[in-house]
């Protein structure tokens, strides 16, 4: 039984192209042949109306901020939106989570 080779990650493949160690054409071919993993996506929900990329989490009212940013770094408007999200989730919690998520977030595809 032949051994199964591990795929090169998409990010590593892009890095090889960027560093000039692989052409874009060879990268695409290797991806097609299954030697390089394709782009991955997952669903994520982000607060609408804020300048920063703020992702909401469940089942807690916590939010995930961009690397290096804390809640105290947000401007008053963004902080108000985050606080509104937190208080709404705490008050209503699980039975209407889908409703609150629809009101406060937009579904995005996160590529990694």
Image (cartoon, rainbow, N blue to C red):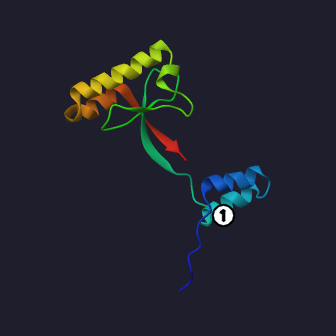
Depth order, front residue of 86/41: 86
Find residue 47 and report its image quarter: top left
Residue at 39 percent across and 29 percent down: it is 105
Point out the residue furthest to the bottom here.
Answer: 1
On the image, the x and y values in percent for residue 88 come to 28, 23
Side of 65 where 30 appears, left or right: right
| x, y percent for residue 107 | 41, 36
Looking at the image, which residue is at 67% across and 56% down? 13
The answer to which quarter of the image holds residue 20 is: bottom right
Q: Is residue 96 left or right of residue 27?
A: left
In the depicted structure, whether residue 35 falls above or below residue 69? below
User: What residue is rendered at 44% in x and 18% in y?
Assistant: 79
Q: Secondary structure at mark 1?
A: helix
Task: From the viewer's side, name the closer residue of 33 and 87.
Answer: 87
Q: Which residue is mark 1?
A: 30
- Count the marks: how many? 1
Q: Quadrant of residue 23?
A: bottom right
Up the image or down, 44 lies above or below 52; here it is below
Mark 1 crowdedness (10 Å alpha carbons): few <14, some 14-19, many ≥20: some
> Which residue is drawn at the image coordinates 49% and 48% (left, top)?
41
Name the spot of residue 96 as percent of width and height, x first: 22, 32
Q: Is residue 74 above or below residue 9?
A: above
């Amino acid at each position: 039984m032949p051994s199964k080779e591990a795929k090169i990650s998409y990010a590593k493949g892009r890095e090889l192209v960027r560093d000039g160690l692989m052409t874009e054409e060879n990268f695409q071919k290797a991806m097609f042949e299954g030697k390089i993993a394709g782009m991955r996506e997952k669903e994520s929900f982000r607060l609408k109306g804020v300048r920063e990329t703020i992702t909401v989490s469940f089942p807690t009212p916590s939010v995930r901020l961009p690397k290096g940013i804390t809640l105290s770094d947000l401007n008053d408007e963004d902080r108000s939106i985050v606080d509104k999200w937190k208080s709404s989730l705490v008050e209503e919690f699980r039975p209407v989570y889908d409703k609150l998520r629809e009101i406060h977030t937009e579904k995005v595809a996160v590529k990694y």
